[in-house]
Amino acid sequence: MDLLQAILLGILQGITEFLPVSSSGHLALARALLGRDLEPGITFEIVVHFGSFCSIAVYYREKIFEIIKDLVSSFSPSGLKSGKFKTDANTRLSMIILISLIPAMIVGFTMKDLIESLFVNPFFVSCMLIITGTLLFSTKFVKNPDKEVDVKRGILMGVAQAMAIIPGISRSGSTISVGLFSGVDRVNVANFSFLMVLPVLAGAMILEVGEIAETGIAMEAVLSLFAGFLTSFIAGYYALKYLVILLKRDKFHYFSYYCWAAGLFGMIYFF
């Protein structure tokens, strides 16, 4: 992979990982349009996903530190004795995030081969982008959601995250949309949607690091890998920041027009 290709793929990963337009769908369509040589390889995929992970970690750094501090306090001897682990809001949030991962784990481990086969069908991916656009547009009719994330709403968003394993279905788009429909307010739904993906990204990287250990990293690839990481991190950070702003301004559904246009183009081109 040359430097320019690494930069472009890093930007593509960073932007589409957070904007509700499906990163997996865009990569599948890009491969179909530009050729199989666009396949980035396992090492590059881990590096750009690490860039996305760092984007969330930096953007939500204060909240993450707060959660870690409260978890340590809740499960300390004094916290266990006082029952703080039962009442602390951040500890409860962490438990809900862990519960929300269960649907994605079940789908990922039981339907892995089927899902991977869908990536080679660009017409199907384009159809899924149309569905994503329709889901996003429907949030226009959600009025003044004001609830917090509880176990039930967390599981619903977890199911949405599991369905987003399908290429063309946006993870952020589906989780945020389902959260809004279940009544979660716009700030909390954004926070939960992106905090809940941190363990998913971390788990995916851990599972794939073993393959890097076996194959190693060629010295000539280091510059391209660093460029991919850096562009994914920067693009991801600003995409996340921009999305949260639009969500707070009740303009989340604007992304539906792009998904419809991209999906319609793909359906016509690959028919």
Image (spheres, grey):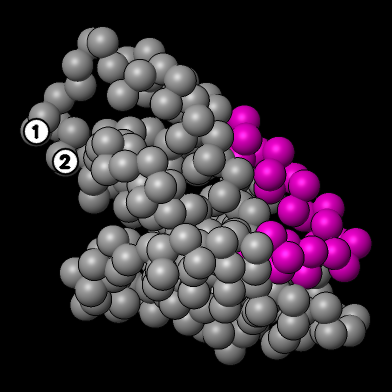
Helix, strand or loop status at disc 1: helix
Quarter of image, res 191? bottom right
Disc 1 residue crowd, few under 14, some 14–19, many 20+, Cα 10 Å = few
Q: Looking at the picture, does residue 179 appear above or below residue 228?
A: below
Disc 2 residue crowd, few under 14, some 14–19, many 20+, Cα 10 Å = few
> Residue 234: horizontal and vertical position, in percent?
62, 30
Quadrant placement of the C terminus: bottom left
Is residue 149 something one can see in this rendering? no
Viewer-closest of 5 and 88: 5
Residue displayed at 30% across by 78% down: 106
Q: Looking at the picture, does residue 224 appear above or below residue 141?
A: above
Is residue 242 something one can see in this rendering? yes
Q: Looking at the picture, does residue 180 appear above or below residue 118?
A: below
> Residue 43: horizontal and vertical position, in percent?
27, 34
Residue displayed at 31% across by 77% down: 107
Q: Looking at the picture, does residue 34 appear above or below residue 222?
A: below
Q: Which mark is residue 214?
A: 1
Quarter of image, res 147? bottom right
Instruction: Measure how far apart labels 1 and 2 are at the Cα level.
Output: 6 Å
> Residue 89: horizontal and vertical position, in percent?
68, 69
Quadrant placement of the N terminus: top left
Task: Evaluate if marks 1 and 2 touch, with contact meaning CB atoms under 8 Å apart.
Answer: yes
Asked if the magenta segment contains residue 245, the reply would be yes
Q: Amino acid at mark 1?
A: Glu
Q: Which mark is residue 210?
A: 2
> Residue 128: horizontal and vertical position, in percent?
49, 73
Q: Is residue 177 left or right of residue 16?
A: right
Residue displayed at 58% across by 89% down: 152
Helix, strand or loop status at disc 2: helix
Q: Amino acid at mark 2?
A: Gly
Magenta region: 233-259
